[in-house]
């Protein structure tokens, strides 16, 4: 356990020297290389920069990273995918792309809010589909609030937190709030 404590303290020390730039870079790197541990980076941001600033850095940068991934796949690969579908008559793939494009806003928010959902694949699927960016962006704003909260406050002590009913209750309440907020926005902003 001393090794973990020493490692965390060294990371915090290094991140403090570079300012918020270090926290931003870590989260953006994870957006490009999804094998990196987002949960650890978010936890380090909160431990280094405090609850509010660390949370904001993680939340905003996660949204920026997801947006970059969305537009990368939209601008480079989407047209090629649809040409491939029409040339080869891949009805199953076309059916999946249509289903992704038409996913309800509320469902998208919940998918993005669940901490164990592979966000990289959601970004790719949304970018390749014909989903409008506005819908994706508003879903990110709401869903990533819950996800960043989960990883920031539960972080690396996930196993301990799972046995803590109060943490599970807070996560359930946040998911409910995300659901209700997404329903409200769906009606007010006409995002479906």
Image: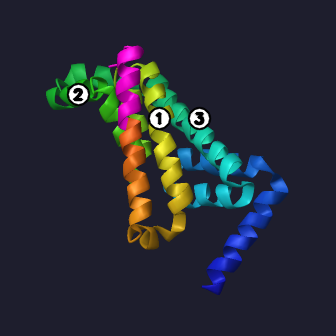
Question: On the image, numbered disc 1 is attached to which residue?
Answer: 142
Instruction: Check disc 1 and report its element: helix, strand or loop.
Output: helix
Residue nearest the observer in this picture, 181 or 70: 181
Q: Is residue 185 magenta?
A: yes
Q: Which quarter of the figure has residue 107?
A: top left
Q: Residue at x 27, y 23 (%)?
A: 102
Task: Tell me, for residue 99, which label it has, or none.
Answer: 2
Q: Is residue 189 magenta?
A: yes
Q: Which residues are magenta?
A: 179-192
Horizontal and vertical percent position of residue 135: 41, 22
Q: Quadrant of the N terminus?
A: bottom right
Q: Earlier in the sequence, mark 2 or mark 3?
A: 3
Q: Residue at x 48, y 27 (%)?
A: 137
Label 1: how many residues lie within 10 Å, few (<14), some (14-19) or many (20+)? many
Task: Tell me, for residue 93, which label it has, or none.
Answer: none
Disc 2/disc 3 C-alpha distance (Å):
25 Å
Horizontal and vertical percent position of residue 70: 47, 31
Disc 3/disc 1 C-alpha distance (Å):
14 Å
- Vertical placement of residue 22 versus 138, above or below: below
- Would residue 153 appear left or right of 164 to someone viewing this image? right
- Would residue 82 appear left or right of 157 to someone viewing this image? left
Disc 1/disc 2 C-alpha distance (Å):
21 Å
Task: Tell me, for residue 64, which label it has, or none.
Answer: 3
**Label 3 vs label 1, nearer the camera:** 1
């Amino acid at each position: 356990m001393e090794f973990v404590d020493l490692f965390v303290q060294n990371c915090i020390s290094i991140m403090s020297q570079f300012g918020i730039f270090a926290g931003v870079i870590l989260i953006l790197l994870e957006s490009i290389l999804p094998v990196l541990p987002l949960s650890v980076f978010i936890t380090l941001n909160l431990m280094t920069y405090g609850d509010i600033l660390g949370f904001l850095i993680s939340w905003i940068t996660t949204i920026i990273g997801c947006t970059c991934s969305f537009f990368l796949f939209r601008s480079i690969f989407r047209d090629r995918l649809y040409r491939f579908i029409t040339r080869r008559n891949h009805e199953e793939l076309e059916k999946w792309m249509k289903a992704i494009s038409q996913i309800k806003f509320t469902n998208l928010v919940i998918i993005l809010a669940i901490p164990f959902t592979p966000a990289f694949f959601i970004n790719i699927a949304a970018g390749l589909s014909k989903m409008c960016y506005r819908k994706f962006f508003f879903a990110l704003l709401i869903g990533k609030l819950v996800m960043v909260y989960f990883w920031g406050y539960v972080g690396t002590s996930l196993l301990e937190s799972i046995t803590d009913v109060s943490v599970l209750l807070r996560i359930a309440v946040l998911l409910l709030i995300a659901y209700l907020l997404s329903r409200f926005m769906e009606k007010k902003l006409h995002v479906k």
